[in-house]
Amino acid sequence: QVQLVESGGGLVQAGGSLTLSCAASGRGFSFNTMGWYRQTAGMRRELVATITSGGRTNYADRVKGRFTISRDNAKNTVYLLMNSLKPEDTTVYFCNARAQAGPYEYQYWGQGAQVTVSS
């Protein structure tokens, strides 16, 4: 089974920075695209950023230039550096990983990390 363990959420003032981390583990699995999503007011999960195992990144327009996603493949860990945080960035952030075992790919989610940005 695959586990995703998130850390790094918290409270920060507007304009500040936070870094989220997500460590993935699972015997027999390799991790393809990993990323971060966040909960919307309508309880959906919207894309924040993704990164492939080869390092190709993709960002939502509203975070481009402020957030940076990176990963350490040796540790199966993905990071999200969030700079210039705004109150509207306040929500729960979820780690996502596509894990492969043999010919099959599965999607997993972390438990969520609360990020609160005060004005």
Image: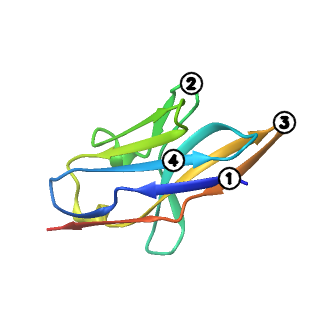
Number of the front mark, 3 or 2: 3
Which residue corresponds to the image point at 23% horizontal and 54% vertical from the top-left? 85
How far separated are the C-alphas under marks 2 and 1? 21 Å
**Which of the two discs, 4 and 2, sits closer to the camera?**
4
C-alpha span from label 1 to label 3:
14 Å
Q: Residues within 10 Å of mark 4 (few under 14, many from 20)?
A: some
Residue furthest to the bottom: 42
Spot occupied by residue 31 in the image (x, y as percentages of width and height):
65, 38
7 vs 44, nearest the viewer: 7
Q: Is residue 43 above or below residue 22?
A: below
Q: Position of residue 22 (x, y in %)?
A: 48, 49
As drawn, the label of residue 2 is 1
Q: Which residue appears farthest toward the front when viewing the image?
A: 27
Which residue is label 3 attached to?
A: 102
> Which residue in the structure is indicated by mark 4?
23
Q: Label 1 amino acid?
A: Val
Q: CA distance from mark 3 to mark 4?
A: 21 Å
Q: Of marks 2 and 1, which one's residue comes earlier in the chain?
A: 1
* In-image side of 81 versus 14 (left or right): right
In the structure shown, which secondary structural element does the residue marked by tag 1 occupy? loop
Which one is earlier in the sequence, the residue at label 1 or at label 3? 1
Residue, x 57% and y 32% (percent of image)?
52
Q: Compare marks 3 and 2 and give the one earlier in the sequence.
A: 2
Q: Amino acid at mark 4?
A: Ala
Give me the C-alpha separation between circle 4 and circle 1. 10 Å
Mark 3 to mark 2 CA distance (whole Å): 19 Å
